[in-house]
Amino acid sequence: MNMECENGLCGCPMHQEQEQPAVKYAYSVAVRFKNAAKPYSFGCDNADIKKGSWVVVETAQGIEMGEVDADALSIDKYNLHMPTKPIIRIATEKDQKMYAENTIAESEAYRICNEEILHLNLDMNLMSAQYTLDRSKVLFVYLADQRVDFRELLKVLGTRLHCRIELRQIGERDKAKMVGGIGMCGMETCCSRYKNHFDVISINMAKTQQLALNVEKLSGMCGKLMCCLKYEENDYKELTAGLPKMGSQVEYDGMVYRLTSMNVMKQEAKLENREQVLFISLENLREKAIPRKGFIQQNNQKSDKPVHRTMVHEGVAIPVNKDKAVHVSTDLPTVKVESSKPQNNRSNNKKTNRNHSNKQNQPRQNAGKNTAEHKKVTVRTFGRKKKDEGDNA
């Protein structure tokens, strides 16, 4: 590279483009394209362009036709940003006819591309196909979890469609933006209505807003965390700045409590210990509460009596008698169960079973005794007979 090119004095096309001054337009026109979430601004010098008319413009994709979303506005009068792309012309009948033909050609290109994807056994889900106005390029949008080697697909589509081929991979959020739908709030999804880019959403945003960490309820149509978790995150961070963490031990008015809950909208926090439940404002929690790390509250487990805790609302009048204190019992109502009855029943059942078995065994034992006695008698008589026979002999 010579010195002239380094200084920008060579006159090459690259430096000529850099030296060209920015073109200024008198009016700015908002143009909306098909399947676009928002309109885009284009410059022109014609104030006769009205809402609802169709114009031909040059975009990064090529020559396209779009519908004017609002009347032309004066840039100097409304102090608008200067558009970078101009409006080429107002759409003619030829442009309208070509635009209608492209709609039919897009469906045919979609069918051809889908056939080749199935033939090549590619792991991709084709979403849409879109031609430019002059049909010099076709854009295929597909959904895939991983990168796809579509070099062979490009060769086949180039020979069948005879134009430039562009394949663009999108994710689940982009798919939900294209398809659209109704969110949990009952309104149209934010991505399909007005969002242009997707923010990074994490589960820590739900923790900051003290929401239940249920991923199914916090997920949108795309299966990802909902974009609206980002909207109020900064407000919650600002309102909870300087406050102790949830579940931590704090000292307040000479007593140690545990921070159990916090309501940012009501500006109220709940402190609890074994003797008392205290509701204070977030301002008092921030200024008067002292965090205590490593403190362990000892519970008196030997006492069988139910523990009563006093509930106190700071700055809130409780409609109760002044002479009586408000007691809140944290223990469940105790029900005395006599443990001897079921044991006696079991023992009685065992006894009855034993008696019944004994009664059943008694006839058998008696029968055994009788047989034994009968045997003895027979033995004796048999012995006597033998003796008698011996004496007679």
Image: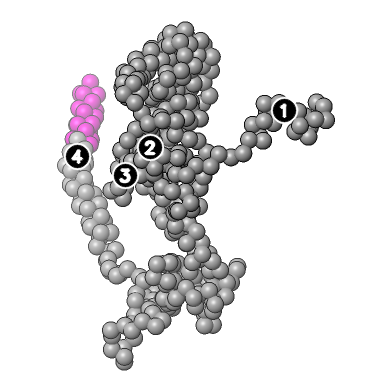
Q: Which residues are magenta?
A: 372-393
> In which quarter of the view is residue 121 placed?
top left
Q: Nearer the viewer, mark 1 or mark 2?
A: 1
* 248, 20: nearer the viewer: 20
Question: Where is residue 148 drawn, in percent x and y?
Answer: 51, 21
User: Looking at the image, is 213 positioned above or below residue 257?
Assistant: above
Per the image, label 1 sits on a secondary structure element best described as loop
Residue at the image point whose x is 83% and y is 30% from the top? 3
* 371, 381: nearer the viewer: 371
Q: Evaluate whether residue 222 shows in this view.
A: no
Alpha-carbon distance for marks 1 and 2? 38 Å
Q: Which residue is mark 4?
A: 364
* 219, 376: nearer the viewer: 219
Q: Nearer the viewer, mark 3 or mark 4?
A: 3
Q: Quadrant of the C terminus?
A: top left
Residue at the image point whose x is 47% and y is 49% from the top? 75
Q: Which residue is mark 1?
A: 11
* 62, 283: nearer the viewer: 62
Question: Could you tell me the amino acid type at mark 4?
Answer: Arg
User: Looking at the image, is 279 positioned above or below residue 355?
Assistant: below
Q: Is residue 124 magenta?
A: no
Q: Are marks 1 and 3 in contact (CB under 8 Å)?
A: no
Q: Which residue is mark 2?
A: 32
Would residue 355 be found to the left or right of residue 11 on screen? left
Per the image, label 4 sits on a secondary structure element best described as helix
Per the image, label 2 sits on a secondary structure element best described as strand
Question: Could you tell me the amino acid type at mark 1?
Answer: Gly
